[in-house]
Amino acid sequence: MIIGNDVKQWQSIRRQDSVDTMLGFVPTMGALHQGHLSLVNRSLQENDKTVVSIFLNPTQFNDPKDLSGYPQTLEQDIAALETAGVDVLLLPDFEQVYPDNYRYKLIESEFSQQLCGASRPGHFDGVLTVVMKLLNIVQAHNAYFGEKDYQQYVLIKEMAEAFFLRTKIIACPTVREADGLAFSSRNARLATGERILAPFFHKTLTQDMSVDSLKAQLESYGFKVDYLEELSGRRYGAVYLGKVRLIDNVAI
Ligand code: AMP
């Protein structure tokens, strides 16, 4: 596996690569788990070469404590990607990705203001800006995103269409622990009691009940509900267990 932190060098390698080489791309923020690896494996199956990026993007964190407490497991991540058979790992730093120091932003004005966007102001500006930069850097044929962050996937897919990007945006199903909890880098921050409670979030989301009853049920278990809404055939939720914020969604 080639590991590169020089964006300009990567761009010149990319330009020399044959246009026939199908390239798949999986952007991540690291602390890799089985959810990330399912995206990587899908890309490995569907492309000649797979590029993964690990970049903990500060512009999408509206809460500085969330950023400073974000788990980082770079050595294990590199080993897991190497074992999976990834071709290139990009590890750019802030200056490489933001030579403009975030003067230029990509802003969506409707869906990004709802759900997670309503409780995390500026979050999706940071997400869309960094994904646009990474897609432009990597110039892949296919890029893979998890349904676990369904709102993010929809916004990225529609952004790619709006800006006529060459990369096809592909959704991959949410990977869950045996008890139903969606794999998330933030799960590592759950205390033992919180981890036992956490699967009831997904279990409750799948029940055939009104949104108000679901909220009441989650609160009675000890979750603090950030939002729970149904939109376009999907039920979206975000809850707090202590300081840890969990999100999930199911088709209805
Ligand atoms: P992150 O590192 O959290 O930015 O996630 C990188 C990519 O992995 C995003 O496309 C996420 O939607 C995806 N992802 C994270 N958790 C899961 C999961 N449990 N199942 C499937 N995809 C996931």
Image (cartoon, grey):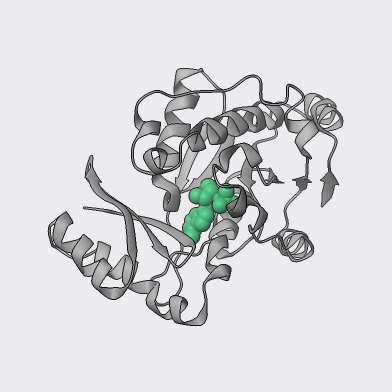
User: Compared with residue 22, is residue 224 higher up or lower down, i.e. above or below?
Assistant: below
Q: Position of residue 251 (x, y in %)?
A: 26, 52
Q: Quadrant of residue 126?
A: top right
Q: Residue at x 46, y 36 (%)?
A: 121
Q: Is residue 141 visible?
A: no
Q: Is residue 236 rendered to the left or right of residue 72? A: left
Q: Where is 65 relative to 145, above or below?
A: below
**Residue under the image location 26 percent in, 67 percent down:** 219
Q: Which of the pair 115/141 is nearer the observer?
A: 115
Numbered marks: total: 0
The residue depicted at 42 percent of the width and 50 percent of the height is: 147
Q: Position of residue 113 (x, y in %)?
A: 37, 32
Front position in the image: 32 or 111 = 111
- x and y percentages locating residue 102 in the rendered image: 67, 25
Left of 20 or right of it: where is 247? left
Frontmost residue, 241 versus 49: 241
